[in-house]
Amino acid sequence: MKKIIFLVMLTLSFSFLFAQTSNDTIVKKTIDSVLVNAYIKSLKTYHLPEVSGVLIFAGKKTNVVNTDPGNTNLTQNIVRTIFAKVPGLNTWDMDGAGSQLNIATRGTDAHRSIEMNMRQNGYGTNSDMFGYPENHYTVPLQGVKQVQYVRGSAALQFGPQFGGMMNYIMKQGDSTKPVAIESQQTVGSNNLFNSFTSVGGTKGKFSYYAFFDYRHTNGWRDNADFNYHALYANLTWKFSSKANISLQFSRSDYIQQIAGGLTDLQFNTNAKQSVRSRNYFQPFINIPALIFNYNISADTHLEITTHAIIGQRNSVQFINTPNILDTINKALNSYNPRQVDRDYYNGFTTEARLLHQYKLGKINSTLAGGLRYFNQVTKRKQKGVGTTGIDFDLTLVKPYGNDLRLKTHNYAAFIENIFQVTPLFSVTPGVRYEIIRSDLSGVISNASVPILYKGTRNFPLFGLGLQYQLAKDAQIYGNASQAYRPYLYSNATPADRIDKVDENLKDSKGYDIDLGVRGRYKGIISYDLNGYYLFYGNRVGLITQKNADSSSYLYSTNIGNSVSKGAELFVEISLLRLFNNGHYQNDIKVFNSVAYNSSKYTSGTINRNGVNTSVAGNYIENTPEWINRSGVELQFRNFNTRVQYSFTGKNYNDAFNTVSSSNGVTGLIPAYHVWDASFSCQFAKQYELSGGVNNFTDEQYFNRRITFYPGPGILPADGRTFYISLGVKL
């Protein structure tokens, strides 16, 4: 607690110091009434401004996604439609229920967005950012106003990962009345039902917003039932013209029946089939947060965010490859016992950020700085022997084989500064310093020798951004920034009593370079074209080593490096404005979002069946070379619709680039094409009808083979499904 108080007091001290150099004059003016005519807006800006709140985005590769039910499937969190205009995002279609947002880019892993710094209203939602960064928290996108995404250069202001930072900005209460209610009810294929209801408003100095979401489906595949709940509440008190404080609480939980993986033969015979009926997964995450904003002066702004992550990840499964059926064991006269795995998360984070605008001689400058304190304890209990039953049941018959306590402390500080060298050209250098302390203890597989592992790492990260304003709505941007990914607890934990971990195991570190041009032209065309180079060093893996007696063991260490390079292009054209530059209530727009990505190992040796094998020159796992999403959008008064085409190229799910395997666990992931359509229509002022068809050509495809949860094997994506929603605003 003393450390937290120190961080806050230090930030406040700097805040008031900077405030002394600023003018704090309030000018009040009275203006005449204004008549506003509403039209459908021209093409949007799809990137973040140079400065937003207490954050700097000048020179960085950024994207902004505004949620729109007419053009995307918000009810089921269909990522390929929601992020269609963000080139290069690779997604994993685990199910059609939106239980998880699996997102990656530039050669990183999409599994529960494990290599993304996931945030909501500026605070983190990853379960354990420094030890087990999977994002088990799933926000219903019906409650999200905007999604902000910053690529690898985000590491300076936000910390890990290589995939960048994605921030979900939640909706707020109506500022014009004390109570406003919205409700949307959705039904669809496979017994889909979703009920989303929100309430919000403003009364005096208080504003509030809250929602509750319930979702159920039987699933497109057999044995894929799903029940999901999410709630969010925000109460904001604006206690002066300069300051406000917000108390927020978020929760998501669900129980999902896991249909399991398939072999290639099983998938080609019937992709909807399941050979697992007793496997279940249950995460629940609670996130209380407190956000304090203070405009110290017109030029100096302070934000302090404190939040906790309290939750669990639970599963009960018969874990085996799909060619081994889950049948009655004749010796037991029952099913085989299932494996029970449980994680308990308890994390606390405080971040203080300050932004100050000032003059350095004749040069306008903007300074952003911040401090972070992070403390996380994860209790991991694995390989427990569960019941032989068929329902979700975490009861143990025998104790856990693995019982671990995983603790991390992190201290970090960063500073970035925009130097406006000329009215058109700016330079933004930055630096971040990280201190990470890890402490692992416990028992592995009931070994007699306890596991003890401690590590402390200290390192700086540097970055430089450049931006040149070509015209009012066009700019060239470039950024070179170091990034890192902390090694995971699984990397520092031996699988059994004979495995060993490198005492000098290092975090993966590297850098990300972007160079691009973006902008708009007369409301007719929006565009963003950039090239990138991402170096990912010190990747962690397993190699085979020999003891003095020539016996072998697996050794967890840094095994090599990789490089991802390519180009990303987004372009959107208004066909009506192309021929007439006036204002329209109607419009026809076409867009294309395409990315070429070459991600390969440049060095590295990994254990393969007891033999150390080079992977240099091989493609990185689960990274297609081509991702393309194109669409046509029609706006006709209160009616919106989109037809979208998505293409993802072939890729491999292991570093050895295995083409096929008899059990489906490793092999080629073929290229696939998917078509989607959606619409929305507002009527009688307060009602909205929306809906659509996902994968309306009924493409049979998969984009994931997996060697662990929730497989192993091929995990098929959903075939053709539909949904329809009715919404009301009161």
Image (cartoon, rainbow, N blue to C red):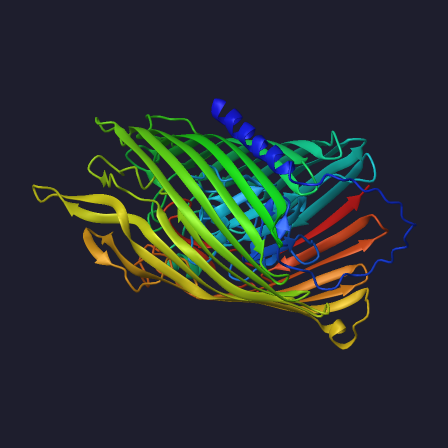
- Residue that appears at 27% across and 30% down: 451
**Residue 157, x across and y down, in percent:** 51, 45
Image quarter (top left, top right, bottom left or bottom right) of the C terminus: top right
x%, y% of residue 197? 71, 39
**Looking at the rendering, which quadrant does residue 199 occupy?**
top right
Observer-nearest residue: 336 or 419?
Answer: 419
Residue 75, position as x, y percentages in the image: 64, 48
Task: Answer left or right for 339 relative to 575.
Answer: left
Q: At 80% across and 54% down in the image, what residue appears?
A: 682
Q: Nearer the viewer, residue 256 or 648?
A: 648
Say if 72 sits above or below 356 in the image: below
Q: Residue 6 or 23: which is nearer the viewer?
A: 23
* Drawn side of residue 572 relative to residue 480, left or right: right
Name which quarter of the figure residue 50 lies in: bottom right
364 or 498: which is nearer to us? 364
Left or right: where 580 falls relative to 109: right
